Image (cartoon, coloured by chain):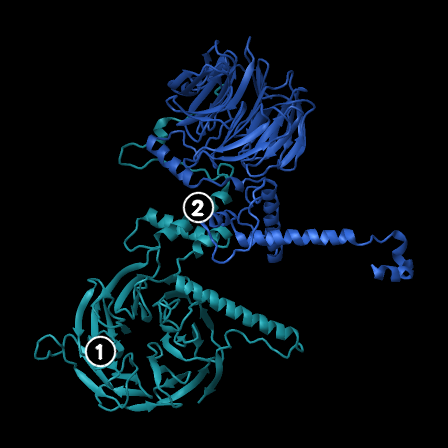
Amino acid sequence: MERTYRIKQKDLQEHLDISSADKIFDLDLPDFGPYSMDYTRNGKYLLLGGRKGHLATMDWRNGNLTCEFHVRETIRDVAWLHNESMFAVAQKKYAYIYDHTGAEVHCLQKHVEPTALGFLPYHFLLASTGNSGKVVYQDVTEGSVAGEHRTGYGECHVLKVNPYNAVVNLGHSNGIVTMWAPKQAQPLAKILCHQGPVQAMAIDRTGTYMATSGQDGRLKVWDIRNFKQLHEYKTTRPAHSLDISQQGLLAAGYGANVTIWKDALANKVKKPYMQRTVGGTSLSDVMFVPYDDVLGYGTDKGVSSIVIPGSGEPNFDAYVANPFQTKKQRQESEIKSLLDKLAPDTIQLDPNFIGRLDPRTAVQRQREAVARQQQEYTENKATGQYLDNTVRNRTRGRNSTAKRYKRKRQGNIMDLKKLQEMEALEKRMRDNENKKRKVPEAEKGALGKFYEQKRKNN
Amino acid sequence: MKVKALSRSTEGYSRETKNSIHKMPRNTDPSLHGFERAREYKRALNSAKLERMFAKPFVAGLSGHIDGIYTLGKNPWDLDSVLTGSGDGEVRLWSLSAQETAWRAPEAHRGIVKGVCYVPGGKTDRFLSVGTDRLAKVWSRAESAYMKDGVTPEPVATYQGKSAFSSVDHHRNRPMFATGASTVEIWDVNRSEPVSNLAWGADSINAVRMNQTEVNVLASCGTDRSIILYDLRTSSPLAKVVMTLSTNAIAWNPVEAFTFATASEDHNAYIFDMRRMDHASTVLKDHVSAVMDIDYAPTGQELVTGAYDRSVRLWDFSKGHSRDIYTTKRMQRVFCVAYTMDNNYVLSGSDDSNLRIWRARASERAGAKSQRERGAMEYADKLKDRYKYVPEVRKVLRQRNIPKGIKSAQRTKNLMLSSRKNKEENQRKHSKPGSMPRVPERNKPILGVTHK
């Protein structure tokens, strides 16, 4: 077997064709700290953000710089939105959205001290997590917050979107990985992955495998559908960043190394596929370019790009992501994808549950609807919504405007009245229960007939 | 050692000239196309909403009559012309494409014009009209003479009956027509007296219809709540069905010779199979007032009804509830409806003296469509079909703006029917099992069938 992990990029450059050889480059940016990076969905544009506040977007294949500016505060993560026209940046206090020219468009104040960002392309949701210990989903088309949940595990630095079912995976400092949906206050699933904080995470595009790395130095590969660990790799240092390419190659950035394993998810392989050591720097972020055989990585001295043959999807579908998109095509596809924007409550672990036959009977559905109404009522009551709104008998001929307004605020009067009556009835039944004499053990059972008289009197 | 890495040249993926189309390579691998179900569902929902947005069925209202339109006659050989007869005795021939009157006979009858019909065959442009003045008149645009004023036309022939006529229909290929008065009379065009008099029972006739496929059969319905089928070859009745309430109109299925639909006073329309008349084959339930007229589409798979509750409803022959309802504030009681022979439009004649043209499929538009447009519409139709049972989509597809009057009448009717049903169920629960057999809805309106 050829020792492919021995091959250096310099050697590779000589054997590749010109256009591929041009994809190996280094951007020397020593001043502004470790770089986070992101590629657009079609792999055409690169967005890089330095920790100390440097932001730039470029068409990396031909070196066209689209915009470059400095925000003069800490940047912890960057993410493209649906296409190259907008991107989001996790800055010191809030998350910001910028235009393709670099103009600040929005300041998202619901995302407090964000540390990691993720974009759900089919739902147009921007998910973030941060030092506040919350996961926040924001709809970037309307601006509304689709979900805001407290994780309960404190600060979180790792967020990855599962491309198969749009579930957001968070890696916490106690080694637990939780899965979130925007409309559910509790996580969909929790997996205890590592003994120690989770450092990095990557999910493959079919949503089958997840690779996580923890501070314990282990790189574990999981089957997310069954929540089972498949195997474990050892890296000399905990991997700071992970990514899985479209063809299933796993890249890990740790220390000054980038290691890539091929076919490493389903089975455990003994040797990595390729490796690269960058001297004197440490890796901060790795990402495969979609639809191309290129891996980009950010270090604390800049951003580089290397060729990994066999990592990209060779046949792209122009209606999904087109690397050769013209301006007109980009505009049309933006409109089409906005029309197809999915509702946030369709996010579940199984994305194909829609349209399935409802197994509940009509009676069950009715009962659940009533239970939901009751729950809503108790919640609203707890917040004090009905304090001055108890349903009173409407007296004839004395309907002033104020009373009419008050009645209107009660909402659906029929349901409210019914629910209040139900509550009163339940209270009465509970009181009656308490009033009744409790039957002692001796009076139950076979000897109970000797005590019948006494019981009847109660 | 040659290393192969992905490298795509822009030449292979960009178009050569501005006039050629863009190259759109495809990859059907499902891992590239995520959220299939969710996206399909969203598109189905969007298609349903667009369908409702585009649902504008009203095309035109043709005015000209000064009294209500009580009868409509369509020419199976000509898409453009339609006849109407009104309450003041006027008969008008309309051109639907020009949306105006092509010909009119202002004093065609001294009373109400009760029936108009064309002479089928397409060889002559003759048509008949009958009225309450006991006269049946044959008109023709080509052959008619005009009266002294040069405008009012004269009939080609006139037939005198013994009592006021209520309905007329012409035979498919022979020169004979049938009229309904106190009995069903068969006339020969060349005789001034009816050739035969068909009667079974003793009450006046509401409607007469000759079967245009099985040409020797005709049906009539009378005020004695009966529907009688006759055979012309033997000049005698075939069968009689007595219903609980009387029938207002009959329409024969143009495709299936033995099926006919009836519009009943009990707010329902019934489809019968002539061979088995002990039960209706389909019950069409949705109107809240007497159904005045019914007509089949030329495909035989759709029906249109007009009712006294000011609405026109469209039905699929296999489903028991209407698929669409057309109303307008200006349209009062609908007395006659027709489905045009190109299967695209529905005509309604109503009390307010207007003839209205409606689209048969409210969201579709006329005109040639490009291949891509047609493909997109077929995709949308298929999506709606697949997701039509999912609650959100179903709610959008079912949504219709029903006028207050009909809505409140529906509520009252449902309340009354459900309370009667509850009472019946309670009685059944408290009586000996088997003593109260369930009667199918199809059998309920039929009191009895007799065969000759």
Task: For mark 2, name the chain.
Answer: B
Q: Nearer the viewer, residue B262 or B88?
A: B88
Mark found first going from the N terminus, 1 or 2: 2
Mark 1 Cα-neighbour bin, 10 Å: few <14, some 14–19, many ≥20: many
Element at label 1: loop
> x%, y% of residue B328?
32, 62
Callouts 1 and 2 close, C-beta under 8 Å? no
> x%, y% of residue B357?
28, 63
Position of residue A322 in the picture relative to residue A423 (left or right): left
Q: Is residue A392 above or below residue B190?
A: above
| Residue B89 badge | 1
| Residue B43 badge | 2
Task: For mark 1, name the chain.
Answer: B
Which quadrant of the figure has residue A173? top right
Element at label 2: helix
Extreme residue toward the front, this view: A398
Q: Colour of chain A?
A: blue
Residue type at mark 1 is Gly
> x%, y% of residue A37?
49, 21
Mark 2 Cα-neighbour bin, 10 Å: few <14, some 14–19, many ≥20: many
Q: How many marks?
A: 2
Do tags 1 and 2 sit on the same chain?
Answer: yes
Q: Nearer the viewer, residue A218 or B5?
A: A218
Viewport quadrant of the C terminus of chain B: bottom left
Q: Is residue A427 above or below residue A152?
A: below
Q: Is residue A293 above or below residue B132?
A: above
> x%, y% of residue B298?
34, 68
Whether residue A357 appears in this view of the structure is: no
Q: Is residue A261 above or below residue B416?
A: above
Q: Label 1 vs label 2: CA separation? A: 53 Å
Q: Which chain is cyan?
A: B
Residue type at mark 2 is Arg
